[in-house]
Amino acid sequence: MTYEGSYLWEIRQRVGSHLLLMPGAQVLVVDAADRILFQRSRDSGLWELPAGAAEPGDSFRRTAARELLEETGLVVAEDDLVPFASLSQADLHTLTYPNGDVLHCFALCFEARAWTGELRAEADEVLEVGFFAGPPGELHPPTRVALELYDAYRASGAFQAW
């Protein structure tokens, strides 16, 4: 789904760019060589994980699966998504978009190691996408924290909340 016509777009028609609280999800996709899927955002030019806002009726898992498909062309079964962390710190996860819209995002972070589909960058939101052994460039700040939380999760086996 494109931004125009989405739930968030409908709300923005009523409230303008004012701060909104938004649940969402992001997906850390790991391939067989332990490389991570990164995408470069059209909005900021920064590298990030596939992520996005929930739509009415979505669960966190459905949001994660839908956003991964929309942004990268990869299909993941909701049951194959493993939650490893949450991000909600306002100082880190309040985003101001180029058009002035402001969101404080509450994201559940998932790991995915199984998927189907052909990798491709979604033209409206993503400049490029690929699997990399490490970050391919400057990271979106919440992505940097998500990677740190993922490392802590892998080391401890415990869900991380930040």
Image (spheres, grey):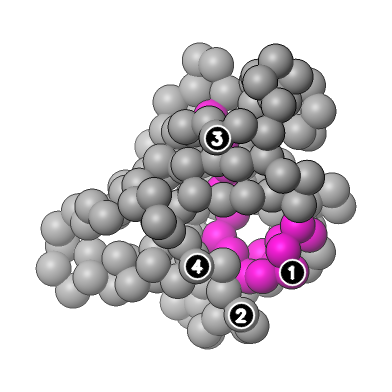
x, y (%) of residue 106? 40, 41
Dot 2 or dot 1: first in sequence order is 1
Tell me the number on the disc at residue 68: none
Depicted 39 relative to depicted 101: above or below: below
Q: CA distance from mark 3 to mark 1?
A: 23 Å
User: Mark 2: few, some, or many residues within 10 Å (few <14, many ≥20)?
Assistant: few
Residue assigned mark 2 = 138
Is the residue under label 1 in contact with that under label 2 (CB below 8 Å)? yes
Pick the residue in front: 101 or 55. 101
Which structural element holds mark 2?
loop
Is residue 50 part of the magenta span, yes or no? yes
Quadrant the N terminus occupies: top right
Q: Pick the residue in front: 117 or 111.
A: 111
Residue 78 seen by the camera: no
- Residue at 33%, 72% in the rendered image: 148
C-alpha distance separating marks 2 and 1: 9 Å
The residue pinned by badge 3 equals 19
Identify residue type, mark 4: Pro
Q: Report the disc number at residue 141.
A: 4
Mark with earlier residue (2, 3): 3
Q: Which mark is on residue 45?
A: 1
Answer above or below: position of 19 versus 92. Answer: above
Q: Are marks 3 and 4 in contact (CB under 8 Å)?
A: no
Eye-nearest disc, 2 or 3? 3
Magenta-highlighted residues: 37-54
